[in-house]
Amino acid sequence: MLKFLSKPIRRLRLTAADKEFYQNLKKILGFAPDNLDVYKLALVHRSASLIISPGQKVDNERLEYLGDAILDAIVADYLFAEFPNSDEGFLTKMRAKIVSRNNMNQLAISIGLPDVVKVNNGALNHQKYIYGNALEAIVGAMFIDKGFKFTSDVVVNNFLRRHINLEELESIEYDYKSRILEIAQKLHIKVAFDTHDYGDNKQKPQFEAILIWNGKEIGRGLGQSKKEAEQKASMQGIELAEGELQSEKQKEDLPNEDPSNEQV
């Protein structure tokens, strides 16, 4: 980590612009940050990268990577406590709904992140989830600044409980196909759908979709449209895909919780 990210802010030395940013951040997150620089970096999209030395640019993608792992752990713990009688399959699907790109993007907009994200306007026209990615980076920044317990409390109490209705989310039809494709992209795994006509009833045609994950079939679904069939196949395969994603994340060593030990 860049050395300046480990330094707490000196509130008496803040510039006028820093003071405004500090107040906006405090309002959005619900607490006073100690290390302002790490939050600044968390809000810099790569289209607006900072040049810190000749040939060296920085943006929020490393913090996004960190925040993604932290967020998964927080949401898993939250759901485990909220649904004590639910099985692994239900918890996995609920976690997938909460951390989906679309949901994270909507959550970021709800808490006001678009007001402070630095992004080239052109990027907004081509990338749908800039604000959700920035929210993950903010979670990574909180972890560095405050540690896991504090970050978990903020995410659960200030974000999830205030902005996500679990009962409503439970009843929402989830886009399993998009989540499957998202996980495959993260893991660099080849995924494909073999979708074809099924049966001989021309009056009421049906389609069958077979989900191929890294060369193996992991889901199969029938539907009256190709879209419905692929969603059902994805629903069958989501637990395996989520499981592989979590296994991959567990292989990575998380940073020391004590931010004073962090160096780049």
Image (tube, rainbow, N blue to C red):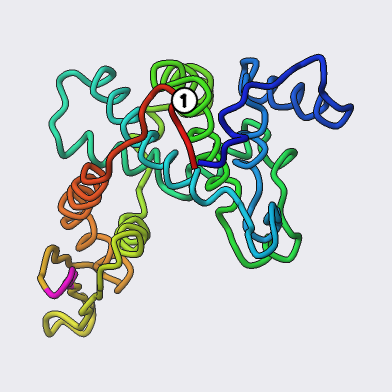
Name the residue at 62% across, 58% down. Answer: 46
Q: Indicate yes or no whether the magenta region holds residue 183.
A: no
Name the residue at 29% across, 61% down. Answer: 187
x and y, in percent, of residue 27 in the image: 70, 20
Magenta part of the protein: which range? 210-215
Describe the element under mark 1 as helix, strand or loop. helix
The reply, left or right, for residue 149 in relation to residue 188 is right
Q: Quadrant of residue 149?
A: top left
x and y, in percent, of residue 41 in the image: 63, 42
Q: Amino acid under label 1?
A: Pro
The reply, left or right, for residue 134 in relation to residue 74 is right
Q: Residue furthest right?
A: 16
Name the residue at 62% across, 19% down. Answer: 34
Name the residue at 83% across, 27% down. Answer: 20
x and y, in percent, of residue 135 in the image: 55, 39
Q: Where does label 1 land, which residue?
A: 259
